[in-house]
Image: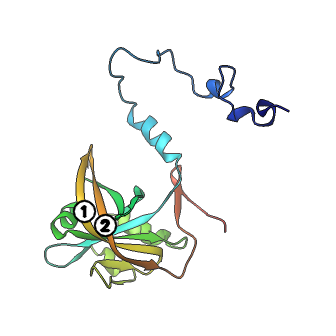
Amino acid sequence: MSAWEKFPMACTGPESAAMDMFPMSGLDHEPAGRPPSVDRDTFRTVMGSFASGVCVVTTTDAAGLPKGFTCSAVCSVSADPPLLLAAVSNRSSSLVAAVERGRFAVNMLNHDARRVSQVFASLVKDKFERVRWDRGRVSGMPVLVDVVAYAECELDQSVPAGDHTLLVGRLIGGGLGPERRPLTYWRGAYVEVLG
């Protein structure tokens, strides 16, 4: 039995069915100019199909007051040195605080923390009065209780990227929460991770 018969979608020849899955929409392989960007709805539909964990990025402002926002654009960057990144809206007051403070924490929410996610995605002023939290042992940044894990970071660099800024943080501390199943977001809704 050929590989095509066993795994038809895994083969990549001119006869591959995968070619029909991703049509070129009439474009040549090498367009003459720079193609236009997709519209916002297409972008959101495509990227919303990528399941992601839900995090809350926290920091403190110049007065030491806690700040934070819900973030699903978080990923690891490097193991040596240990780096992660979080994308922050340029309109967020937490961005200014994180850059000025030079430290932040990434709180990876557990599956029961939908309310926490919603609090930090809202515009309410007293977010930290509505959740359980403590100070990180290494950074002093706010660390939430309802997490599967958390990372305490020192800002390595901030990189402008469209309407967001990428905060690249070097991990200086971290730990695990009591829950081991993450809160996950996919196609505009929270979804359950079985395990």
Q: Is residue 192 above or below residue 18?
A: below
Would residue 25 be seen by someone viewing this image from the given angle? yes
> Residue flagged by tag 2: what amino acid is it?
Arg
Q: Earlier in the sequence, mark 2 or mark 1?
A: 1
Q: Do callouts 2 and 1 mark residues in contact (Cβ within 8 Å)?
A: yes
**Viewer-side residue, 130 vs 147:** 147
Question: What's under tag 1, amino acid-wise?
Answer: Asp
> Regarding mark 1 in the picture, which secondary structure is present there?
strand
Q: Give the SS element for disc 2.
A: strand
Labelled disc at residue 170 = 2
Instruction: Please report the residue visible at 53 percent of the width from the left and 61 percent of the height from the top.
Output: 184
Residue 179 vertical placement versus 45 (above, below): below
Quarter of the figure with residue 66: bottom left
Quarter of the image for residue 92 reads bottom left
Q: Residue 156: which disc?
A: 1
Whole-percent x, y for residue 170 in the image: 31, 67
* Residue 117 drawn at (x, y percent): 43, 67
Mark yes or no: residue 91 visible: no
- Residue 119 image offset from top left, x and y in percent: 38, 69
What residue is shown at x 14% (from left), y 77% (from top)?
63
Quarter-of-image position of residue 44: top left
Q: Is residue 168 above or below residue 30?
A: below
Crowding at mark 2 (Cα within 10 Å: few <14, some 14-19, many 20+): many
